Image (tube, helix red, strand yellow):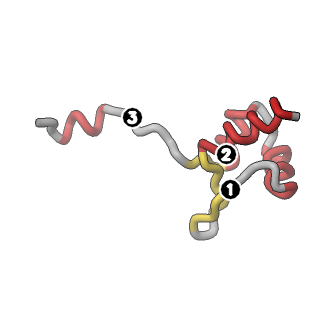
Amino acid sequence: MSNHADRESAPVPPVLYRVEEAADALRLSRTGIYELIRSGRLRTVKVGSRRLVPVEALGEYVNALDAA
């Protein structure tokens, strides 16, 4: 049986990135990310007033680049 200390030591991988984190992951600027969002090439979700990028959306964007 696992205890509380074990859960605290294991990092939880993100499932949603802030725009800045998505920019870092894709090696793009914040402005570049917002342009991709505006153009519909990068999928996002809205949580309250925050615009977040699902981790899978980064892969979808990169796969679309490969297909082009």
Image check: 24 left or right of 55?
Answer: right
| Cα distance in 3D space between marks 3 and 2 | 21 Å
Q: Label 3 neighbourhood size at 10 Å, few (<14), some (14-19), many (20+)?
A: few
| Mark whose residue sits in front, 3 or 1 | 1
Residue at which label 2 appears: 57
**Mark 3 or mark 1, which has the lower sequence index?**
3
Residue 23, quarter of picture: top right
Q: Residue at x 70, y 35 (%)?
A: 24
- Residue closest to the far left: 1
- Identify the mark at residue 44; answer none if there is no mark: 1
Figure label count: 3
Measured as percent of width and height from the top left, residue 14 is found at: 50, 42
- Residue closest to the far front: 67
Three-letter code, disc 3: Pro
Are the two marked residues, 2 and 1, in contact with CB atoms closer than 8 angstroms? yes
**Mark 3 or mark 2, which has the lower sequence index?**
3
Three-letter code, disc 2: Ala
| Cα distance in 3D space between marks 2 and 1 | 7 Å
**Mark 2 or mark 1, which has the lower sequence index?**
1
Q: Residue at x 80, y 36 (%)?
A: 28
Three-letter code, disc 1: Thr
